[in-house]
């Protein structure tokens, strides 16, 4: 259990270690609850959107959003990624806001300069990316306005501000889905535009508010030393971040280019359903990574090893659960045009599983400041994925992209594992557990495909997996339930 922190080494008092572990657990649980609620709203909204948008319109909207995520990293120089590292040395509350103010102002100015450069050579860029100048201008504006939100959320994550992150995660996804539906109805001639604006409207609004708060609390500070230190962390990581987006999103862009917008629309629906796994897992890893850095500082290896096994199992069972229920969700709620999506969900989920598992190894590399190594591994994997996609999509069709992504993420996992072992021989993770779960998931995924998503096979696998988890973590589940019951009981007595 994460809240059972190892007693070995370190300068932090035992009480502080327990408090740190407790806050991390609270953050994980609140992130998870908020995102489960948010994803539930998304699942309700998805069939409405698929009925309002054609497969081609869905493909255009998803392609724009994917490209916007790539452009955001380049425009803002990925400076938000430096927060975890910088906050380790910047302890003072006011000083942290001066740092945020510095990188917020700098990255916003850089974004405007890049946009001006774009305007000079917009013709060839538009032709290459497949969007006209008004759409690209919209993209630039959205990226800049979201900046404050991105920085503030990263700030909340590091500081374990559970209430703020809970509110953000609870509101962001449902509001974006509801607004998407409203705007699609308001803009009948350009429905895809409603989807595009709706998805990020909440983040844009919050970004403007957070930008004002950052500049105000940071007293409009523009410290060159903070900008320099932040860039030293973020710039080497840009190739890594771009490669990660290419790994997760180039499938969609290449399908749109090679096969067509309709196939991209079907693939995007499958990815949206499978992305539930990514969203849930990401919320677990957000507080996990800073916690790991603090444990490494105090040489608490056993604590990392034990708790990482629990996280592996959580992601694993969620993966099985999502692709078990996916076909029924698609049949019950989504337009028949998207029926093929059910066959793509299992391999996409498997790819996401390996995507999350490599994060364990990445954390150790990042702690040791091996940013260039991280970037090289990501670029290699992205190139491999692009080559595999091009070959496989042309030969076997757009569905093949899901399987090439599995191969790419396995390669990424292996590269980061051996990269981690090269710089640090400490046994932070139980490799046997990871391999066992990976093999079980691979066999499960292909069993679903071979038996054509047989409902019997899927639910037998889910029940067996669920029983395994209950047996393995029986004590943890009972202890957690007992503590929750005691708290409710105590509150009840106080109210009386």
Image: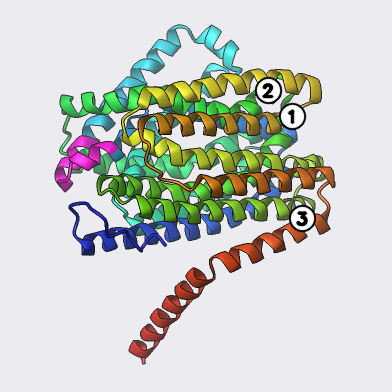
Q: Residue at x 49, y 40 (%)?
A: 200
Report the front residue among 359 and 238: 359
Percent of width and height locating residue 328: 77, 55
Report the front residue among 187 and 51: 51
Q: Is residue 257 visible?
A: no
Q: Which mark is residue 69?
A: none
Q: Does 326 appear in magenta? A: no
Magenta stretch bounds: 85-100
Q: Residue at x 32, y 27 (%)?
A: 108
Q: Which numbered disc, 2 or 1, marks the residue that appears first in the sequence? A: 2
**Residue 370, image quadrant:** top left
Disc 3 to disc 2: CB gap under 8 Å: no
What whole-number distance in Å separates the C-alpha atoms at marks 3 and 2?
Answer: 28 Å
Identify the image's colour scheme: rainbow, by chain, secondary structure or one colour. Answer: rainbow
Q: Classify mark 3: residues with Cα within 10 Å, few (<14), some (14-19) or many (20+).
A: many
**Residue 271, image quadrant:** top right
Q: Is residue 423 left or right of residue 275?
A: left
Disc 1 to disc 3: CB gap under 8 Å: no
Q: Which mark is residue 400?
A: 1
Q: Which numbered disc, 3 or 2, marks the residue that appears first in the sequence? A: 2
Q: Which mark is residue 389?
A: 2
Q: Kindly state the secondary structure of the residue where label 3 is placed.
A: helix
Q: Which residue is mark 3?
A: 458
Q: Does 90 appear in magenta? A: yes
Disc 2 to disc 1: CB gap under 8 Å: yes
Q: Classify mark 1: residues with Cα within 10 Å, few (<14), some (14-19) or many (20+).
A: many
């Amino acid at each position: 259990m994460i809240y059972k922190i190892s007693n070995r080494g370190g300068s932090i008092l035992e009480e502080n270690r327990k408090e740190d572990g407790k806050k991390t657990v609270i953050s994980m649980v609140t992130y998870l609850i908020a995102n489960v609620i948010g994803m539930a709203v998304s699942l309700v909204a998805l069939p409405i959107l698929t009925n309002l948008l054609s497969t081609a319109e869905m493909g255009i909207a998803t392609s724009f959003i994917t490209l916007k995520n790539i452009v955001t990293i380049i425009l803002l120089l990925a400076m938000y990624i430096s927060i975890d590292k910088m906050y380790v040395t910047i302890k003072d509350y006011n000083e942290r806001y001066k740092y945020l103010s510095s990188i917020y102002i700098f990255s916003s100015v850089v974004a405007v300069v890049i946009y001006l450069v774009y305007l000079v050579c917009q013709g060839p860029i538009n032709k290459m990316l497949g969007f006209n100048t008004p759409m690209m201008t919209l993209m630039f504006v959205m990226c800049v306005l979201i900046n404050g939100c991105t920085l503030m959320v990263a700030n909340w994550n590091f500081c374990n501000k559970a209430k703020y992150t809970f509110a953000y995660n609870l509101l962001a996804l449902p509001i974006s889905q509801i607004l998407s539906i409203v705007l699609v109805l308001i803009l009948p001639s350009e429905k895809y535009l409603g989807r595009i604006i709706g998805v990020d409207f909440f983040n844009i609004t919050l970004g403007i508010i957070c930008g004002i708060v950052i500049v105000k609390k940071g007293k409009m500070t523009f410290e060159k030393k903070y900008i320099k230190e932040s860039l030293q962390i973020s710039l080497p990581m840009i190739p890594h971040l771009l490669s990660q987006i290419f790994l997760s999103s180039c499938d969609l862009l290449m399908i749109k280019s090679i096969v067509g917008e309709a196939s991209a629309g079907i693939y995007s629906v499958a990815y949206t359903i499978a992305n539930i796994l990514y969203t849930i897992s990401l919320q677990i890893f957000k507080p996990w990574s800073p916690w790991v850095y603090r444990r490494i500082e105090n040489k608490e290896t056993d604590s990392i090893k034990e708790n990482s096994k629990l996280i592996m199992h959580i992601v694993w069972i969620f993966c099985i659960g999502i692709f078990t229920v996916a076909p029924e969700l698609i049949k019950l709620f989504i337009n028949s045009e998207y029926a093929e999506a059910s066959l793509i969900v299992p391999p996409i989920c498997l790819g996401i599983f390996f995507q999350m598992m490599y994060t364990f190894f990445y954390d150790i590399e990042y702690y040791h400041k091996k940013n260039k190594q991280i970037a090289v591994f990501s670029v290699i994997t992205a190139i491999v994925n692009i080559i595999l996609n091009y070959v496989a999509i042309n030969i076997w069709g757009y569905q093949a992209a899901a399987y090439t992504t599995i191969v790419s993420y396995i390669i990424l996992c292996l590269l980061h594992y051996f990269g981690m072992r090269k710089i640090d021989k400490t046994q932070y993770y139980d490799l046997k557990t990871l391999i066992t779960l990976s093999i079980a998931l691979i066999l499960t995924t292909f069993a679903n495909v071979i038996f054509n998503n047989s409902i019997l096979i899927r639910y037998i696998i889910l029940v067996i997996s669920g029983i395994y988890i209950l047996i393995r973590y029986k004590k943890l589940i009972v202890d957690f339930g007992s503590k929750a019951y005691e708290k409710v009981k105590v509150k009840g007595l106080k109210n009386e």
